[in-house]
Amino acid sequence: MKIAVAGTGYVGLSLATLLSQKNEVVALDVIPEKVEKINNRISPIQDEYIEKYFKEKELNLKATLDYKEAFENAEFIIISTPTNYDSEKNYFDTSSVEDIIQKVKSMNIDTTMVVKSTIPVGFIKAMKERYQIDNIMFSPEFLREGKALYDNLYPSRIIVGEKSDRAEKFANLLKENCLKEDVVVKYMDSTEAEAVKLFANTYLALRVAYFNELDTYAELKGLNTKDIIDGVCLDPRIGNHYNNPSFGFGGYCLPKDSKQLKANYKDVPENIISAIVESNRTRKDHIADMISKRNPKVVGIYRLTMKSGSDNFRASAIQGVMKRIKAKGIEVVVYEPTLKEDNFFNSKVIKDIDEFKKISDVIIVNRLDENVSNVKDKVYTRDLFARD
């Protein structure tokens, strides 16, 4: 069958790659360079398995800038365009999703839209009422940046926000193209599926925040954080995973999803959800304070990306640390090889790694790698396990 995918970020491109193994897939994007790269089988994002499949697999995949070309005769239109939560306006920006809905409605075609973008609880129900449509459902994604296709090939679960034949057909599409056997599939109403996405990501944010606060305590009290975490995580109920301290949680999902969930609690009693959001701010304050205590003249930011194997630095925690350090009047320089610009938020971007290491008094590193192994005396990191 023909499937359209609107948006070619981590979610959209991983799904387009997955489904184009056995189906005709047309991917829609608004950026000509991304479309050209996909058509030349060059991944526009850093993802090991997407790059591998682009090189090794016969994929029935085409990218286009023309939405009519993408949507015409498509049995499913997967919407994976970017959304974001503005905590100052208390507003979740879903305009990119609504734009696709309007385009599909204007074409008057027999298709089913499947929203994969993160959306607020109640969104699908609201869209059905606003646009007087029924051909739309939600299916949350649970992917890691840099490992998006891998996580689609070996999914933790498949959730579809509808109990219907078309929901089963869509779930089977995902199952048929993945490599994991006996994938758990759950069908539920759209609103519950929307809640699953926000609650799952906020729990992950909670876990990051918890081990970061453990690390803050240990650092200020002169204790060995790693020993404490090892001892705590040997309890099988806690588990030895997702426990490596960092500068905070960031990226596409955790900051906006936890803030969105907090907004949904407007009329509901809560303590934990607000604390998770606030804890991330506190952590960045602490990191900036620890660096300023070293009295550096120049602080070097080594990589803006969240973690190894990813080229995304959207809302990365290290940017929050960077802003706080600059607010203290300390000069900040940046080493980020994916940046073409000479400046990043009025901080000089140093292209030469040796020059960067030479002029920086302190180098802050969210995730260690061998490029800074020869200047350990300058490095400040909370990466205790040398893994994400």
Image (cartoon, helix red, strand yellow):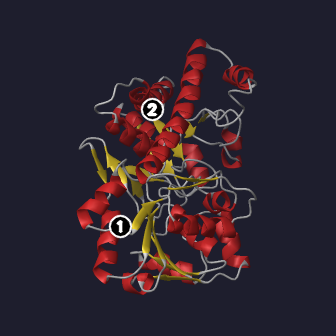
From this viewpoint, is residue 383 visible? yes
Q: Is residue 119 left or right of residue 91?
A: right
The amino acid type found where label 1 is placed reads Asp
Determine whether, in the image, residue 91 is placed left or right of residue 291.
Answer: left
Left or right: where 23 falls relative to 346:
right
Is label 1 or label 2 in front?
1
Q: Is residue 8 above or below residue 215?
A: below
Hey, what amino acid is under mark 2? Answer: Asn
Q: What residue does disc 2 label?
A: 280
Dot 1 or dot 2, earlier in sequence:
1
Task: Looking at this view, name the residue that lies furthest to the top.
Answer: 221
Q: Please name the residue shown 57% across and 35% down the image.
A: 246
Helix, strand or loop under label 2 = helix
Residue 141: percent from left, percent from top? 53, 55
Q: Quadrant of residue 236?
A: top right
Name the disc covering residue 116, or none. none
Whether residue 316 is visible, yes or no, is no
Which structural element holds mark 1?
loop
The quadrant the N terminus occupies is bottom right
Name the foreground residue: 359 vs 287.
287
Residue 198 sits in quarter: top left
Eyeballing the image, is 98 above or below 157?
below
Q: Residue at x 44, y 25 (%)?
A: 272
**Position of residue 343 measured from the top left corner of the image (x, y, whole percent):** 40, 56
10 Å crowding of disc 1: few (<14), some (14-19), many (20+): few
Q: Residue at x 52, y 62 (%)?
A: 11
Dot label at residue 134:
1
Say whether marks 1 and 2 touch (CB < 8 Å). no
Seen from the viewer's position, the closer of residues 190 and 44 is: 190
x then y, percent, for residue 98 = 31, 65
Name the image quarter holding the C terminus. Answer: top right
| Residue 68 locus on image (x, y percent) | 37, 85
